[in-house]
Image: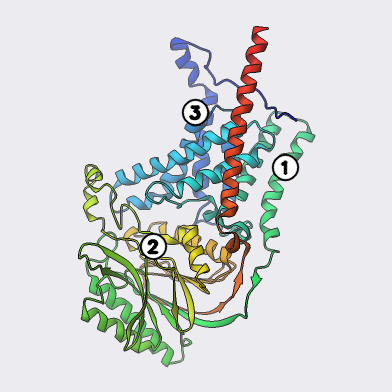
Amino acid sequence: MAVTAEPVAPEPGAQATGSRAGRRWWSPFVAARVLGAAGGGVLLYLSFPPRTLWWLALPAFALLAVVLHGRRARTGFGYGFLFGLGFLLPLLAWTGSFVGSLPWLVLSAFEALFVGLAGSGIAVVSRLPAAPVWAAAVWVAGEAVRGRVPFGGLPWGRVGFGQPDGPLLPVAAIGGEPLLSFAAVLAGLALGELVRRIARRRSPRLLLAPALVAVLAVAAGPLAALVPATPNGADRTVTIAAVQGNVPRLGLDFNAQRRAVLDNHVRVTEQLAADVAAGRVPRPDLVIWPENSSDIDPLRNPDAAAQIDRAARAVGVPLLVGTVLRNPDGRTTSNSALVWEAGVGVVERNDKRRVQPFGEYMPWREFFRLFSPYVDRAGYFVPGDGAGAVDMAGVRVGIAICWEVAFDDLVADSVAAGAQVLAVPSNNATFGLSEMTYQQLAMSRVRAVEHDRPVIVATTSGVSATITPDGTVTASTQQFTPDVLVDRTRLRDTTTLATRWRSAPEWALVAVGVLAIGTGIVVRRRAARRAGRDEDG
């Protein structure tokens, strides 16, 4: 059976010429669409933590659906770009906290280009039957590209990461964050199609399909919660402590007093040991320190090693220490997590596997130096190639250092390496009192559900947290306050469908999106040829 589509509506002023064309191009309809696109992006931003307004993602994509319906691909790109700016400019504002507005604006505008491409694709498929389904797949395809290119990609701000407080969260256990994004976007797009049909006074029969799709998309979360993870062995309970030592100052110079940062973590750990001895808290089986808790290389500096060993002796259990190690070449460094045992020193090491461009290293350094004096403050870090998991006191701990938690494959690799619990050692002091730490915490909650694993977030300056496998935050710290969290953590030996399928759901959705765009292009060309023949006749 041939696939047909509605004829493409011309843009306002498309048939006009001269000065009249300029006047008609900026019509009230175009102005409304511009405001709708940008406003939808702002609504999507407001749906993200630290707010718990997850449901705002639905009207955000409803607006986008209405704006893009029937538009041409190039027009869809423009509206998609505006949607991306409305979303990413406020979401990524923390990137400019201490380096100025220009890098933040450039990054946001560049990432919005990918949203523009998704908008172009959504416009192309908007007149196909079941358009919201294909459009949601197109959106996931856009997120897949944005999360991989350039320089390894920026998965920050994927829609699923804004849903840890919503009913859709259990979907992550079925198909990971991509399927969670798909469900949330689909619900919003279907809502938009429903509103559009109501506004056009379509018959009640034509309202049924988008209403049903929206309901089913939202119901996917509760239905996914009914699917149990596959048990592989018996559960057991351990006690894990996360130490937040705090830093002497905010911003890029957080580690200007590097010894002070290390001493802070030693002091808080010794206080933990005192609390254990006094019976105020249970004795931990292992202790997690954050990323950069010792920016002094303990393998080259005996005084730093002595301080770390002092803390390990006090608490009497292995420490996971975040540190910066100077590599043998004398030029590059590694962002490492070391398992430190008292009197022994380092027994295991995990290096950060995906280092952050424009922070931990600077691509095209000479070129970008033309735009910002902060370029020379970027590091010379190199990525590690480990499994992303270490053994501590008989516990297999998966390691996702800071922004690594945003990457599906890295977390999946840690679980595949046998991780029973996920640790997210992070240093958020660089970004001050911004929303960055809450956005990262939301990602950790999604990962907990995705792989049915407890997650321990340990940061230098907050927010540190303990998270159960269902994504619940059981305890958390305040920002820029020394603190320690001690959690009785239930370790599970289970496998979720998301863990088993890894990236297969994402690639399936990408394929659906690409095929839908191809179909949309063919259908539009056929419709244009038919329209041309009708005019000739």
x and y percentages locating residue 524 in the rendered image = 61, 25
Q: Is residue 201 above or below residue 118?
A: above
Residue at image coords 22%, 69%: 257
Disc ID at residue 211: 1
The N terminus sits in image quarter: top right
The residue that disc 3 covers is: 74
Horizontal side of 530 relative to 35 (left or right) equals right
Q: Earlier in the sequence, mark 1 or mark 3?
A: 3
The C terminus sits in image quarter: top right
Q: Earlier in the sequence, mark 2 or mark 1?
A: 1
Q: Nearer the viewer, residue 321 or 437?
A: 321
Q: Secondary structure at mark 1?
A: helix
Q: CA distance from mark 3 to mark 2?
A: 38 Å
Q: Is any part of residue 443 visible from this angle?
A: yes
x and y percentages locating residue 331 in the rendered image = 21, 62
- Type of amino acid at the residue the image marks with label 1: Ala
Circle nearer the viewer, 2 or 1: 2
Horizontal side of 258 relative to 322 (left or right) equals left
Q: Is residue 154 above or below residue 207?
A: below
- Type of amino acid at the residue the image marks with label 2: Arg
Is there CB contact under 8 Å for labels 1 and 3? no
Disc ID at residue 353: 2
Q: Secondary structure at mark 3?
A: helix
Circle nearer the viewer, 3 or 2: 2
